[in-house]
Image (cartoon, helix red, strand yellow):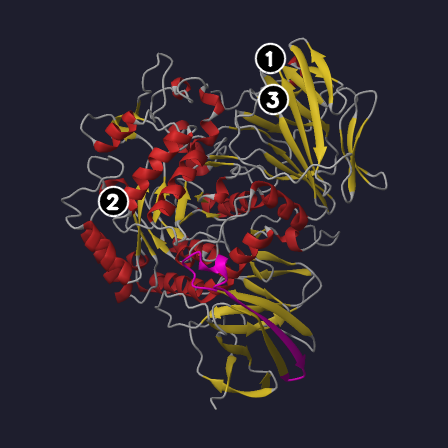
Amino acid sequence: MHFHKYPYPANFEFTAPAPNASFRTQKGSYRLHVEGDGADVYHIQVTGKGWETSDSLAGLRFGKARKGLEGDQTRLVFTKNGGFSLETKDGAVLLASAPGRFFGQCGEASVFEFLREADAQFYGMGEKLTGLEHSGEITKFWNTDIWGDFHWERFINGRPAPDPAYVSIPYLILKRGNTYLGLLLDNPHAAFISTKQTVSIAGQMDLAGGEGRILLGAEQGQPNLYLLHGPSLAELTRRMQRLVGETPLPPAWALGYHQCRWGYQSAADLQTLDARFREHGIPVDGLWLDIEYMERYKVFTLDKAHFPAPRETFAALAKAGRKVVPILDPGVKLEKGYGVYERGQRAEAFCQNPQGRDYVGLVWPGETVFPDFSLESARAWWAQEVARFARLGIRAAWLDMNDPSTGPVENQDMLFQHGAKNHSSFHNQYALGMAMASRAGFLKASPSERPFLLSRSGFTGSNRYTAIWTGDNYSNYHHLKSSIATTLNLALSGIPFNGPDAGGFGGDTTPELISDWFKAGFLFPFFRNHSVINSRQQEPWAFGKKTLAVLRRYIQLRYRLRPYLYQLFARHEQTGEAILRPLFYDFQDTARLPLGRVDDQFMVGPWIMQAPFVEEKQASRTVVLPGGQKWYDASEGRWIAGGRKITVRPQAEETPLYIRDGAILPLARLAPEEAGFHAGNADFRIFLSRNAKTATRYVFDDGATFAYQKGKRSEVEISVQRTGTALAIETALLSGGYGPGDFTFTTETAIQRVRVNGTDAVPCPAQGVAFGRGKTVTWQIAAR
């Protein structure tokens, strides 16, 4: 596979097909299918010779097609001269092709071509390490093992950034002003997207007459394109998420802090970690095991010397509030007598090579065969193996090497569907199939518990089964800063539950770097500290007292804010709302404050904005304060005006953290060192700078099982009215399936009187680590 060679438009035969009609090319007869869901999402499909069926397992949920090509706000127009356009109802053109240039074919390859307007900006594209905005790029979608497939200079320092990366989601967001469109190519074969304005030769000179075009195509596979209209980015993201499926609500512990290192290998290691976290007063939920825990790297095994009594070990740690998360690689050691291999053989579960034998790669166990996750029967076999392993007391897994990585062995010889399908048909979907089977296995073992999976690779729709971490990064400021853009674009591409390895995986981190990384990433959807074998120790206590104090504080702040994160995930499951998002998700561009290229700030839900220091020895930074409302500066404990830019300087223990005026943030009521999740006991921190009203809804359940889907969940509406130095708070229990809840309320000291449902509240002791520097008062209804 050539990562940086692409099908060239001049080699394509472009046609002028009419919608829902047949057309011919030099390769044969084809048909263009066009349908809309009536809600501004359109599906364009081409069928015919070689493109009879789709190989995609994405499972997109396209709404029931309606007659005609009109949505609520838009319509598709096909002209007699072969032109295409997506227009608003009043005729404004949002996207168009040149006459006769809408669709092209070159052998098995296909391409959709659109005109590129000068004011367009581009986002999304799944996991790309090339920044937030994607103008002037041409990129391929082919899951890679970055450390195995690229020179070290590229993956360490990003010169240039390795591309393609671990996750393939060929989804392009087009921004024009404050209007947004989405183009999703549902094709699992090697795909490509181009937003280049010019065509260059060897990167040295532009081709005369080369015009900018937007290209979305694939080297093989049935052409399937979805067009989505926002018009806002928030509306577009919700439509995209409905199409690919919302992310299931994870267990609350998955939103805690996770500690990992390549080298943890034994029950003694886990027990030592548990003791050290308690010693230092640091909450933690997940203790992770890399490949060293296995017997000779054989999947679904434990080295008996390191885990003489695994059930008892896992049970004791679970009782202490720790979940053990082992790594699972898809490769199965080719070894007679090894039960997993023998059972896979009987199930005919392994990929074939061109000679009709099991395909063999070279990864950690040595000669290795690979499950064919394109087969439902193979997924069922893998699910059974996962269930058997999970019954030891394991409730989660880390899915690695599923790009698939085959070591130095050419992966094009790995065939699917008992050898009937070529490698390209399922390469990008391999991790999706593994996640589907693994989730099924955990549900088989514990049907009532929400499982948690983390995967390195993925495809469109992977979010329904697994979270994604952004793969093997490196301990430097380049990776710290780039993690923001990568995480944001993944979130906009249908993968909201994602995040990088905090502190960096490769190399030796420093006290300064890991402090800055924790400050920046403590509210990322996924928060794990992970490091490579033979690097310096990276646990929070490994850097001295000052660094320990900083890392501990931000881990504790995550737990304090976990109820808020949980609300965002619950809201996402219901509506598709993004969790981490760029500033232009919640605020519009203005001439004074253009937001489209702000790549070092982000919103956590609609109420919290972070502007971390992400460059080495950075003396100051500019912070954009979007919108017309005020912001509460948590690091300074004061209100500041929005709609402008300010300059801030770094502080040893603080990070630029801003709360939007009108926020009611649910906070955990627990001791700073505790990691428990008690959603019914919440403290609501009220941020209201003026005489005004604000409101929120809060849902709570057990945080662990599926009982909430059967009514075991409560929802309360909280409304607040400020008048001078007084607050009037009203709470209304909308549903009480998990009880009424026990709440306190925290305000600034400027608030001198609080009434809750008409009854005076009284000050009470604050619970939990302090949220920012501002002085506060916590209130509750007096006991009767």
Give me the residue at 37% from left, 35% from top. 380
Label ID, residue 204: 3
User: Based on the displayed image, in which of its 4 quarters is residue 25 positioned?
Assistant: top right
Dot 1 amino acid type: Gly
Give me the residue at 25% from left, 44% from top. 263
Query: Mark 1 vs mark 2: which is more N-terminal?
Result: 1
Q: Is 711 within the magenta?
A: yes
Give me the residue at 73% from left, 41% from top. 38
Q: Which residue is mark 1?
A: 107
Q: Secondary structure at mark 2?
A: loop
Rounded to the nearest angstrom, the CA distance separating label 2 from label 3 is: 46 Å
Does the rendering let one see residue 469?
yes
Q: Is residue 784 above or below residue 39?
A: below
The residues colored magenta run 701-726
Q: Secondary structure at mark 3?
A: loop
Q: Which residue is mark 2?
A: 263
- As drawn, which residue projects farthest toward the top? 26
